[in-house]
Amino acid sequence: MMIDSNAPLASSSSMNYCSLWTMTDRRLRQQTAAAHDLKLHSPCQEEAMVLSQLELELQGLLRFRKAQVHLLKNGVRLQAIGGAAIDDLLLRASADRLALAHYFLEAAAKLRRMRPGSFRNSTSRSYYSIYHAARTVSFVFHAGDDHQDHKDLHNGIPDEFPDFERWRNDLKEARLRRNEADYDPYPRPDAEFADVSKVQLRVATDFLHVAEQYLRGKGCQL
């Protein structure tokens, strides 16, 4: 899909940093590639003028809107603070989100082991473990947090993810069970969620294992 370099950008409140930064980088690459194909002719000579690599980059930079320039500056600032390239910082942040998924998984297991067990809470924590793991997978693949919404996150699991259709369905099921556990007053006995919490804990454990392998293949240091 071609992106119109003259199309207005969404405001910062309606587009997250990563997606806009990716769009900015994509536009610069497109503009640079177009500049490579451009031949500037003088009316007095047929030989095309050749631009240096720096001139090509600056030519693309001159087409940036104010919001794009701001993002470019912020990216440079972020690299200086983090001491690494943007792509490496994105992977570092992704590893930290996956650590949060592990935290919720451990909480879900502990809640089931309580006597009496806290099965509603365990079901909810298992879902959030799956949610954060899936959000990490989606973020790394799409280079942005474009599918963070709970009802849309399953669409962020890419086709290249192992057994992706199963995990998309399991994520939707886990969200449904979490909603029942968190919001429905019936059934009243917490023990009624014992079997549900057991299944969801197993699903969360399996999904985190697959997600870790996938993310390591993408360069995440876990």
Image (spheres, rainbow, N blue to C red):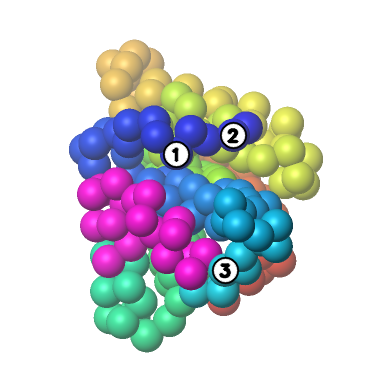
Q: Is residue 3 left or right of residue 77?
A: right
Kindly report the distance in space between the C-alpha atoms of the residues bearing marks 3 and 2: 24 Å
Count of labels shown?
3
Give the percent coordinates (x, y) of residue 94. Answer: 47, 62
Give the percent coordinates (x, y) of residue 172. Answer: 55, 26
Q: Residue furthest top?
A: 186
Residue 78 quadrant: bottom left
* Magenta residue span: 55-73
Residue 15 quadrant: top left
Number of the label disc, if any, that sits on residue 51: 3
Q: Which residue is mark 1?
A: 5
Decide: few, some or many residues near mark 2? Use Cα within 10 Å; few <14, some 14-19, many ≥20. few
Residue 93 seen? yes
Between residues 159 and 2, which one lies in front from this camera angle? 2
Q: Which residue is mark 2?
A: 2
Tag 3's secondary structure?
loop
Residue 211 seen? no
Of the image marks 3 and 2, the number of the one nearer the N terminus: 2
Number of the label disc, if any, that sits on residue 163: none
Kindly report the distance in space between the C-alpha atoms of the residues bearing marks 2 and 1: 9 Å
Q: Is residue 74 above or below residue 9?
A: below
Decide: few, some or many residues near mark 1? Use Cα within 10 Å; few <14, some 14-19, many ≥20. some
- Which residue shows up at 62% across the image and 68% down it? 50
Q: Are marks 2 and 1 in contact (CB under 8 Å)?
A: no
- Which residue shows up at 43% across the image and 81% down it? 84
What's the amino acid at mark 1?
Answer: Ser
